[in-house]
Image (spheres, rainbow, N blue to C red):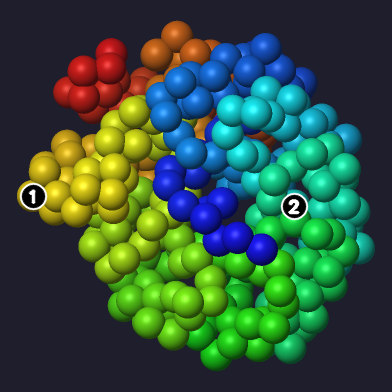
Amino acid sequence: MTKELFEGVLAFPVTPFDELGERIDLRSYERLLNHMIEGGVHAVIPLGSTGEFAYLSTPERQQLAEATVSIAKGRIPSVVGISAITTKETISLAEHAEASGADGVMISIPTYYALGSDEVAAHVEKVARSVKLPVMLYNNPFTSQVDLTGDAIARMVHIENLVAIKEATMDVNRISSLKSRFGNRFQVLGGGFDPYAFPAFCLGVRGWTTGMANLVPSHCVSLHRTVVVESNLVEGRKQHEKLLPLANLLVELGLSKAVKAALGMLGLSAGPARSPLGRLSVENEKRLAAVLADLGVL
């Protein structure tokens, strides 16, 4: 299984809804994916946290997975998020993603019950062995109550098609440690918090999973190319500092609803976030518009 699938800018699209937040708007979704693909992103990962996967029904998730593959096929790879509460449901989503033509899948640790290391390893292995696709494991202790330390990950090195680890703890020491310990075995990706992309690149990370690419895909691609491909840290730092106000504000306001509000400003309507998530206040919309204007995209 190749790790190269998880190099570059891997964009996490939002899930567009109608104005009531009730139905997925596939036309808007296609426009959004085209916007990101034309901006140069290297892969797309639907049904992540940015895509509000936890608020979608199983049929909706299957619909979005199929749409993503249809739009992206032959252009860029699609890596489908398959996270669910139970192992059985996660396997079902993985098998559907594979049958739909996805190039890979992403799995995070189930939420609500805090699992032990043995339970996590067993869950991931059962899911990974249910398909032949490359698998990316997403460490997000903020939602799962489980932090995948190096020792926990070491329990899974034998899973052949587990090829990438997305680390979202915002801990650059953790990223450095994982790169040192598992860099030859797994693709270690920075993700979840865009303000940390530049430091992660400087530590040798080659893949960036980002929700900001919904809005400024070409800016994200330029930052990755400048630092990772060209090794130009001086210019890369300038680009990082230019993007930092937007990256920080998206995290502060809540990624899904903030990205959706910004897309509306850019003429790429994605509807509201699904309830119970709300809309941004007028004041915060103004703050977001000002940051986009400073970047020259509004």
Q: In this view, does 233 lie above or below 257?
A: below
The secondary structure type at the circle numbered 2 is: loop
Q: Which residue is drawn at 34% across and 37% down?
A: 221
Write down the quadrant of residue 266 in the picture: top left
N-terminal of the pair, mark 2 or mark 1, is: 2
- Front residue of this view, candidates 144 and 93: 93
Residue 234 tag number: 1
Q: In this view, does 147 lie above or below 69?
A: below
- Can residue 77 be seen here? yes
- Front residue of this view, candidates 188 and 116: 188
- Can residue 280 be seen here? no
**Mark 1 burial class by Cα count in 10 Å: few <14, some 14-19, many 20+:** few
Q: Is residue 280 above or below residue 92?
A: above
81 on left or right of 227: right
x and y percentages locating residue 109 in the rendered image: 68, 67
x and y percentages locating residue 278 in the rendered image: 55, 32
Write down the quadrant of residue 77 in the picture: top right
Q: Identify the amino acid type marked 2.
A: Ile
